[in-house]
Image (cartoon, rainbow, N blue to C red):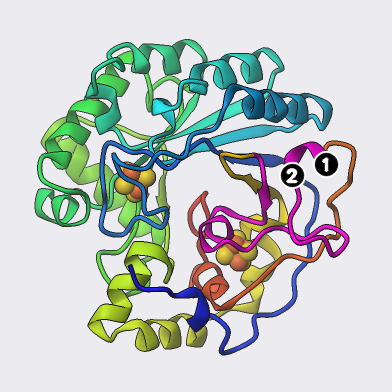
Amino acid sequence: MRDTLSLLDQVPFPAIRRGKLDTLQVNVGYRCNQSCFHCHVNAGPNRTEEMSAQVADVVLDFVKRRRIAMLDITGGAPELNANFRHLVTEARKLGTKVMDRCNLTILEQPGQEDLAEFLCEHRVEVVASMPCYLQDNVERQRGKGVFDGSIRGLKKLNALGFGRDPRLTLNLVYNPQGPALPPPQASLEADYKRVLGENYGIVFNKLFVLANMPIQRFGSTLVSKGQFGDYMKLLRSSHSDANLDSVMCRSLVSVDWQGYLYDCDFNQMLGLPLRIAGKPRAHLRDAIGRDLDGNAIVVRDHCYGCTAGQGSSCGGALA
Ligand code: SF4
Ligand code: SF4
């Protein structure tokens, strides 16, 4: 895979600082049952990084002592981690909201037959990747058979009440096929609701529209095709200062499978740790008693992917 970090230091991104922390985003490992073309994690079935039970307990300690409002669990396919259900169950007992970034096809994997019921029982907010409502586009990004598996997964979630019952949130995630900015979120959400509703009887709450980050598999492909420079120009020229106030790193901190901290999942994948008091990297256990408010955020040119156009975050458009 081609390196992109060395290409992300061309035009300085504005300095930004942390605000109040409300979300702990935990990447429990890079193993996944899929190997999507646009994956910023470079996840796949052969990745071996997995969060241990000891680190999962540090996560729960942090959630409890810092009264974290939202535990956002991601991967890879986070449900494949042996400690996933423990994290969910214990965090919910603490009254913390839990979000599962689910690829939908995991719901049919051996050993995961009861996953949808588990998510339902614990009122986990499901955020599911669905980069198009058309089969060809989904399978070009995510692999053959993924569209039908995703539709079956959505139907299963709907049957349990996700997307219908106000206590069972089901949000979908769109990202563009290639090096272009995403279309306006509201109109695309209306298209998704119409097509998925009419063709498959599927309902969901919101569509989160995300820009592709010029890193890992997607960034590497852009470099190979000679499109990296043009995509970066597009992101920089579409930058809006108004989005700086709401980029997700102001209120979220990202934790890797070993418990080290980053300002966001993208920085985690680039190996750019969160800096506390000038230290090269910090562990979650060192941050339990430390206030991160006002801490400088580590930025590079990929950050323009968060501020271009309508803006982009794990929760969709910022504008
Ligand atoms: S994009 Fe999601 S589903 Fe696809 S390989 Fe990456 S982690 Fe797995
Ligand atoms: S890439 Fe990460 S650090 Fe940069 S603006 Fe986006 S969320 Fe913040």
Magenta-colored span:
259-287
* Residue 291 appears left or right of 249: right
- Mark 2 nearby-residue class (10 Å; few <14, some 14–19, many ≥20): some
User: How far apart, in angstroms, are the residues tagged by discs 2 and 1?
Assistant: 5 Å
Q: Using the image, tell me which numbered label, if any, was put on residue 283.
A: 2
At 58% across and 14% down in the image, what residue appears?
89
Q: Is residue 282 magenta?
A: yes
* Residue 287 appears left or right of 177: right
Image vertical order of residue 263 relative to residue 88, above or below: below
- Which amino acid lies under the numbered mark 1 shown in the image of this protein? Asp
* Residue 161 appears left or right of 265: left
At 51% across and 80% down in the image, what residue appears?
6
Q: Position of residue 200 (x, y in %)?
A: 14, 33
Q: Are marks 2 and 1 in contact (CB under 8 Å)?
A: yes
Q: Position of residue 182 (x, y in %)?
A: 36, 67
Q: Is residue 43 magenta?
A: no
Q: Position of residue 215 (x, y in %)?
A: 43, 68
Q: Which of the 4 quarters of the picture holds residue 224?
A: bottom left
